[in-house]
């Protein structure tokens, strides 16, 4: 099983996996966008989660 699959299933995974490491900058950007939005902007926040 790939490490990304383990993450999505909530299982223990190797955070040093190259695929995961390559994803970190993108995920950090999504996290910043999500957290920057006002809590009342529910649809916009949901859109970020779907991406």
Image (cartoon, rainbow, N blue to C red):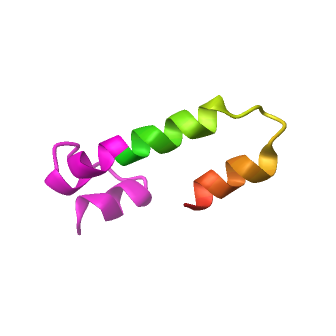
Q: Could you say which is closer to the camera, residue 18 or residue 13?
A: 18
- Along the horizontal axis of the image, is 37 left or right of 20? right
Q: Could you say which is closer to the camera, residue 50 or residue 29?
A: 29
Q: Residue furthest right?
A: 40
Q: Residue furthest bottom?
A: 1
In magenta, the rendered stretch is 1-25
Task: Return the x and y of residue 15 as percentages of the image width and height.
Answer: 23, 43
Q: Residue at x 60, y 54 (%)?
A: 49
- Along the horizontal axis of the image, is 41 left or right of 11? right
Q: Could you say which is closer to the camera, residue 47 or residue 11?
A: 47
Position of the C terminus, as image quadrant, is bottom right
Q: Is 24 inside the magenta-drawn segment?
A: yes
Please determine whether, in this image, residue 38 is positioned above or below residue 8: above
Task: Return the x and y of residue 18 as percentages of the image width and height.
Answer: 15, 52
Task: Return the x and y of residue 21 as percentages of the image width and height.
Answer: 22, 46
Task: Return the x and y of residue 47 as percentages of the image width and height.
Answer: 67, 57
Q: Residue at x 16, y 51 (%)?
A: 17
């Amino acid at each position: 099983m790939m490490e990304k699959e383990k993450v999505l299933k909530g299982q223990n995974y190797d955070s040093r996996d190259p695929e995961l490491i390559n994803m970190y900058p993108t995920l950090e950007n999504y996290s910043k966008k999500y957290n920057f939005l006002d809590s009342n902007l529910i649809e916009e926040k949901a859109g970020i989660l779907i991406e």
